[in-house]
Image (spheres, helix red, strand yellow):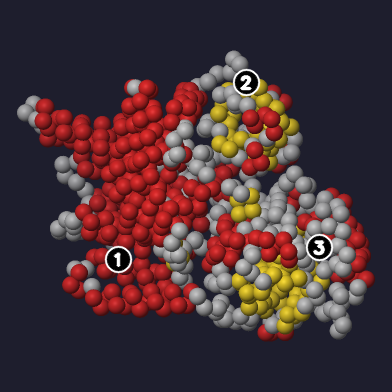
Amino acid sequence: MSRNGQRWLFLAACASGAILLYSSPLLPPLRIFAVTPGIVAVLWFVRRQAGPTRARLWWVMLAGLVVGTGWTAWHAGKQQSSALPAELEGEPLQVQGYLCDHPTPGNFGSQRFSLCVTGWSASLTRRYKQLPDRLRLSIYGDKARQVIPRTLSATVVLKRPHGSVNPVGFRYESWLFRHGYGATGSVRSLEAGNGQDCPLICRYHGWRSKLIDSLSRTIGHSHHFPLALALLTGYRGELTDAHWDTLKKTGTIHLVAISGLHLGLVAMAAAWLVRLVLVFVLAQRVSAQTIRVAVFWSVVLVSTGYALLAGFTVPTRRALIMVVVGSWYLTRAARPPLWQGWLIALLAVLLMDPVAPLDRGFWLSFLAVALLLMLFGGRLGRPGTVQGLVMAQTGIFAGLLPALVWAGEGSPLAGLLANLLAIPLISLLAMPVLMVAGILLALLPVTAHWISWLIDLVLAALWLPLEAIAGLPFPGLYPDLPVSALLSGLFISLALIPASRAFWPGILLAAIWMWQETSTQSISPVPPDDRFRVHVWDVGQGLSVLLEYGPRTLLYDTGPAIPGSYSAVENVLIPNFRKLDVRRIDTLVVSHWDSDHAGGLQQLKGQLPVGRIFSGEPDKVREVLPASKVMPCRNPTLAAAGGVKVRFWRSENPSGGNDSSCVLLVEAPGLTLLLPGDITRETEAEMVASGWLHGSAGMRESGYRLLLAPHHGSKTSSGDVLLESFRPDLTLFSAGYRHRYGHPHPDVTERYRRHGLSTENIACTGAMTFVLEDGQVQVLRSRDSAGFWIDSPGPPCEPG
């Protein structure tokens, strides 16, 4: 291999090393990478002395891996060290700083904002060498209705970055690490930071906030203003639940995240205008290379300006780097191979943003560009406009499918049609009109009324078709990973070969498609073994448990749902069901009608077939699911394959909603599981006194006993009578990390210790899976296999 080839191999190895570090559960000690320059120098010297070419290449790759891993590890370690010290959690702290984004509406009438810290109280800075420099805060009550000052001093109560950890699905903790937050929390009090320094970046954020407020005053009355604001400035705080629902169903969320599509359009417009002026005005005075250089710098300046207008967010910065690299590639007279340009963009992103691999958009962006290079890079002829659009969207849709399936997401089929329609409308109509409208508003504010009318007209042409597509009964595409890879390969192959040769591959693809659609509607397939599995999901302050026994599934509760913010069904259950290939819930038990146990029922019914439904409060469940038969929890018994028996119990005279909980006792050879919902100590005593807990034949005396603590460990539950009667080997608290309810209560954890019983908190372990096989129970904790950036259990997570 030539020296130039070795250089490119070294750069590819650097990128691989930077990415591969994020597959490690542990961060290597930073002192190892302090000697990285020396290691690389030695490896490079050995490479020069190595004889066979193949040996040299191995040394080149090893040197690149060391450099890439060392750079990412140093940056990640530096960010980890800036997290809030555990002993400061829950303590009132004094902090000064400035807003580093525009405040957005939060839950329960709150406002959320990011604070870039410029100073902590003197007592803290004396005790700690490093403290967080970026906080994610919420402000509640009357204070949330006031205008948050640009610079401020505040009293805050913080906790370390923490979030739910499940095998797949959105991880808030990864998102916080990826965006550089060292703590999250709430504001107790604040005041304007009069006299505080406001550096250049502070003034930039202030200018952007004023721009958003100005647009809200001038065109905020227009019907499609939230969409216009998102497309123009990247601010999505005005989008409603209806907007998000349509965008999710049509797979078009990327349209309102200022990224490659938007910056690419702006760059092409700038390049076309500048080139037009230079060619027709100065064509005789400047060389072709000078025109190319002028076009390149105009693209860089205009794209950077639009990225700043859009908030310079993570996807915007990544897209800007890719646009600049792409423009540089086109400027060169002697162009390197296309894939070298792709690699340069990848390296530039990893160099400037080493935590980029934690971002889902990083993978989808570079995979999408790679697919486009594969489809169009080696073609001799240029496809027509329509053919090119269809090839691009079909290729991206099919090519990204395996990655989405691997992440437990899948892809809505409506997305293919929606993007075929929306991308031309965005490119040729919406974005050009919005850009011109923005310029007119800046120069002639008196035109606001007419501009509002024009924006509504243009965006209606985009939004109404998307709403219509979202309302159509399109099935989702959620195949197995091997099937998705086969579908992807066939789609791309069909796009690459001439139409005359595509007949038989098309027939094969259609056959696979029909088989996939048929199998998706069938009952959950029998697992390859007869293991009994219990999945206790990490849903925050709430509860959801999935049982897999033989070919059957039982779901106990669906976790919490907060309108417009979080749904355990959408964020946790559905992605993990797809990963487990669970295509049907045979039995759904809704313990009672609390929002942290019964959230997202309609979403669940819309995503999966559901068989029998039981509930301790069936009338309330019927109000949400009027078309479903909901049976009361009246001591039925379900028998299943493999000797598994599920028994139900409910209080005869419940004192309230919590005591109406439907209690389940699941007995399998080698494991007994008790799911008591939110019952209180009095109802626990009633249940034990009824004799139901031990049954007519007696509860299994041998085997592993697992208890989900009643009411998440509330002080009103987990009485001595229950603990002495059931004697669990392990008790799990399904509660939020440092939640305001304070579960589990210290008195309760002390009671378990007094009885000599082991406890664990799902907030600290992540989702837990109990696998019963050959009479033995294997326990899997999601945090044990999570990445190094996921917080390790702190003081509130000490096991009992």
Q: Quadrant of the N terminus?
A: bottom left
Amino acid type of the residue that numbered disc 2 sits on in the rendered structure: Ala
Asked if residue 82 can be seen in this view, the reply is no
Residue at left offset 44%, top offset 50% = 253
Amino acid type of the residue that numbered disc 1 sits on in the rendered structure: Ile
Residue named by callout 3: 660
The correct choice, above or below, for 476 with respect to 191 in the image is below
Q: Nearer the viewer, residue 104 or 43?
A: 104
Amino acid type of the residue that numbered disc 3 sits on in the rendered structure: Ser
- Describe the element under mark 1 as helix, strand or loop: helix
- Describe the element under mark 2 as helix, strand or loop: strand
Q: Earlier in the sequence, mark 3 or mark 2?
A: 2
Residue at left offset 27%, top offset 53% = 339
How many angstroms separate mark 3 from mark 1 (CA)? 55 Å
Q: Which mark is residue 617?
A: none
How many angstroms separate mark 1 from mark 2 (CA)? 57 Å
Q: Nearer the viewer, residue 587 or 472?
A: 472
> Which of the two marks, 3 or 2, is nearer to us in this view?
3
Left or right: residue 254 compared with residue 302 = right
Location of residue 246 in the rendering, given as x and y in whole percent from the top left corner: 47, 52
Q: Which mark is residue 492?
A: 1
Q: Are marks 1 and 2 in contact (CB under 8 Å)?
A: no
Residue named by callout 2: 192
How many angstroms separate mark 3 from mark 2 (CA)? 49 Å
